[in-house]
Amino acid sequence: MKATSLLLSIGCVGAAGLLFAGADAQVVGNHNSNAPVNFTADRIEVQDRADRVVVSGNVEVTQAGMTLNAARMTVAYRNQPGGGTGGVEIDRIDASGNVVVTKADQTARGNVAIYDLNSKLITMLGNVALTQGSNRLTGGRLVMDLNTGRSIVDGRASGGAGVTGSAGGRVTGTFSVPQRQN
């Protein structure tokens, strides 16, 4: 597998940021958000007049090697022009309840997540944790850009039910360091 880099910009209160590079890390970059979206859940409710689908109970959504798990998701869609066999186009997925996004060796966790398929952004809020191998970042909000592979973690979270930030609104992290011989 080709070695790539993960650019993690970390916005901290009073800190300019930190840039971390590692091998085989940019797995969320160049994600194909045009790939089919597959769902499994205990319950699926189609609200056709509202152009949305509500899925609940052990929800799993997969797309192009990326998996999104949560207790509940609301999927906003629109009918493609021409109707008939044109189907629907998914615009946004809102997930809540122990949200986990995985792709290759990278895992992101949070209380809630918004996947905007048009802008190719996943925003996670509340007790966010991003891990890759033994590297770990925690904070209040995580924004993953699926085009570039860049992930931004900061200490703030937009209030709301079940959405809280990390301790003191700060970002914390642990990075593995290669062992060097003297």
Image (spheres, rainbow, N blue to C red):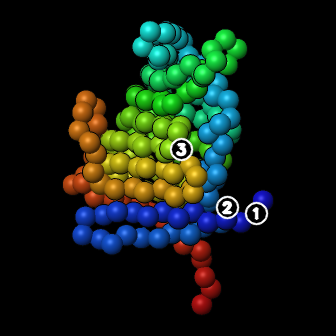
Q: Outermost residue toward the bottom? A: 182
Circle 1 Cα neighbour tier, 10 Å, few/some/many (<14 / 14–19 / ≥20): few
Residue 182: image location, x then y, percent: 60, 90
**Which badge, 2 or 3, is on the more N-terminal residue?**
2
Q: Outermost residue toward the front? A: 82
- The disc labelled 3 sits on which kind of residue? Lys
- The disc labelled 1 sits on which kind of residue? Lys
Distance Cα–Cα, label 1 vs label 3: 23 Å
Residue 90: image location, x then y, percent: 55, 27
**Which badge, 1 or 2, is on the more N-terminal residue?**
1
Q: Nearer the viewer, mark 1 or mark 3?
A: 3
Q: Is residue 32 above or below residue 81?
A: below
Is residue 172 toward the left or the right of residue 159 in the image? right
| Badge 1 vs badge 2, beta-carbon distance below 8 Å | yes
- The disc labelled 2 sits on which kind of residue? Asp
Q: Residue at x 34, y 63 (%)?
A: 11
Q: Outermost residue toward the right? A: 1
Distance Cα–Cα, label 1 vs label 2: 7 Å
Distance Cα–Cα, label 2 vs label 3: 21 Å
| Badge 1 vs badge 3, beta-carbon distance below 8 Å | no
Q: Which mark is residue 120?
A: 3
Q: Is residue 125 above or below residue 26?
A: above
Dot 2 corresponds to which residue? 24
Circle 3 Cα neighbour tier, 10 Å, few/some/many (<14 / 14–19 / ≥20): many
The N terminus lies in quadrant: bottom right
Q: Residue at x 71, y 66 (%)?
A: 3
Please tell me whether mark 2 sits on a helix, a strand or a loop: loop
